[in-house]
Image (spheres, rainbow, N blue to C red):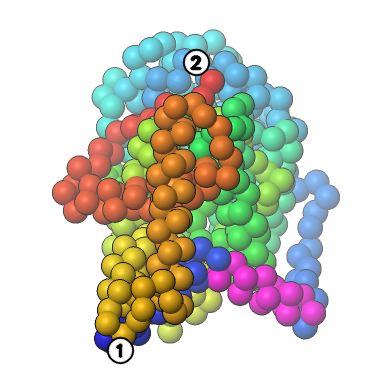
Amino acid sequence: MLAIKILFWFFLFIIFYAYVGYGLLLFIIIKIKRLLSKPARVSREQCYEPEVTLFCTAYNERNYVEKKMDNSLSLEYPAHKLKHLWVTDGSDDGTPEILKKYAEVQVQHQDERAGKVAAMNRGMKFVNTPLVIFSDGNTLLGKESVRRIVNLFQDPIVGCVSGEKRVLQKEKDSAVATEGFYWKYESKLKQWDSELYSVVGAAGELFAIRTELFRPVENDTILDDFIISLEIAKRGYTVKYDPEAYAIETASADIKNELKRKVRIAAGGIQSIVRLKELLNIFRYGVLSFQYISHRVLRWTLAPLGLLVIFILNFLIAFSNEYQIFTGIYCWLFAGQALFYLAAFAGWFFENRKIKIKVLFIPYYFLIMNIAVYLGFFRYIKGGQSVKWEKAKRGM
């Protein structure tokens, strides 16, 4: 029984640390760092305006492309220094034809649909600017996003800059709307990660790199943004973050589509851990490894596993002969877990019946996130994740 208790408390700590504890620890470290040291000052030119390529890979985005182009052409950056490149491999809904109406756009199209990463690898051959900004075809950028991203590259140690993903919630009273709450929390963690040392993974909706640092990515890569940014970090560069450089996209149309997206991300997370296994060596990569393991690896491995393990172990301990039913800390902890899962189930029940009970959205969304990790793990093991665009339906 002692071994079971030790295992229970170990996994309970991992769960707490992965979702809440790391954020609290970061907050404390950053506060201490600000007290003990002055911010590093980088000499910045007022008119630092290198040429930049705004790079979009797209598959069948005819419903978004005109809005995207209107947005891109209105960004606050010298028009003659902002190049527009679209790679539209496999699109057969008229997306390439619509883009060709814009004189400012270079369109690279091929009929074969080989997936986003293959399109990105192919498209990078046409980039001849020192900086390249990647953005999705269905996201709109904040007016000053390009300029804010470019300014951070004045520091020569910065190899990648991540913008912020903002989720537009037209229907706030739904479990899917919790996605926006989650990203606000993630945004704060990224700000602190960036201030401590480096962000661990860029947001695919909006991130930039020094063009010279790009290395072709394996075509079966699921999370290209994550792999590209951390491969650059492995080489000694930092990944910075600016929450005021943002991309806006609508939330998933419903929880089913959100689960589909999360499963893909989870499968990509497991794949990334395997391919970036060197980053697990904290003696070699120091703070970067600490951030990577704390912020990403635990959430894709031990934390979701721990949720199942502590529920089973808690049951065994609470209802063993050593304890009276409903007495002692273990019984209270088990009751708390049971209530949490009942709340998540109730959230699912009411969500499917279009009944709005906000307090139930968070446990429901949290459970969906972790179920997605299990499903993503099995998908990765089976090799069932397609490298082609597998778009989750978004709210309009």
* Magenta segment: 21-35
Q: Nearer the viewer, mark 2 or mark 1?
A: 1
Q: Position of residue 370 (x, y in %)?
A: 38, 53
Residue that numbered label 2 is attached to: 63
Question: In this orientation, which residue lies closer to the viewer: 172 or 385?
Answer: 172
Classify 10 Å Cα crowding around label 1: few (below 14), some (14-19), many (20 and above).
few
Is 391 situated above or below 163? above
| Location of residue 204 with respect to 228 vertically, above or below | above
Q: Which mark is residue 97?
A: none
Q: Using the numbered discs, state the Cα–Cα distance from disc 2 to disc 1 in whole angstroms.
A: 60 Å
Q: Residue at x 80, y 54 (%)?
A: 45
Residue 273: which quarter of the image? bottom left
Location of residue 320 with respect to 70 vertically, above or below = below
Percent across and percent down for residue 144 are 74, 38
* Callout 1 amino acid: Leu
Cβ atoms under marks 2 and 1 closer than 8 Å? no
| Quadrant of the image containing the N terminus | bottom left
The picture places residue 3, in percent across and down from the top left corner, at 28, 86
For this rendering, which residue is in front, 343 or 45? 343
Q: Residue farthest to the front?
A: 324
**Element carrying mark 2:** loop
Which quadrant of the structure image shows residue 15?
A: bottom left
Mark 1 residue element: helix
Query: At 47% across and 15% down in the image, what residue appears?
Result: 62
Residue 281 x, y percent position in the rendering: 38, 78
- The reply to whether the magenta stretch includes residue 214 is no
Q: Mark 1 — residue? A: 2
Amino acid at pointer 2: Asn
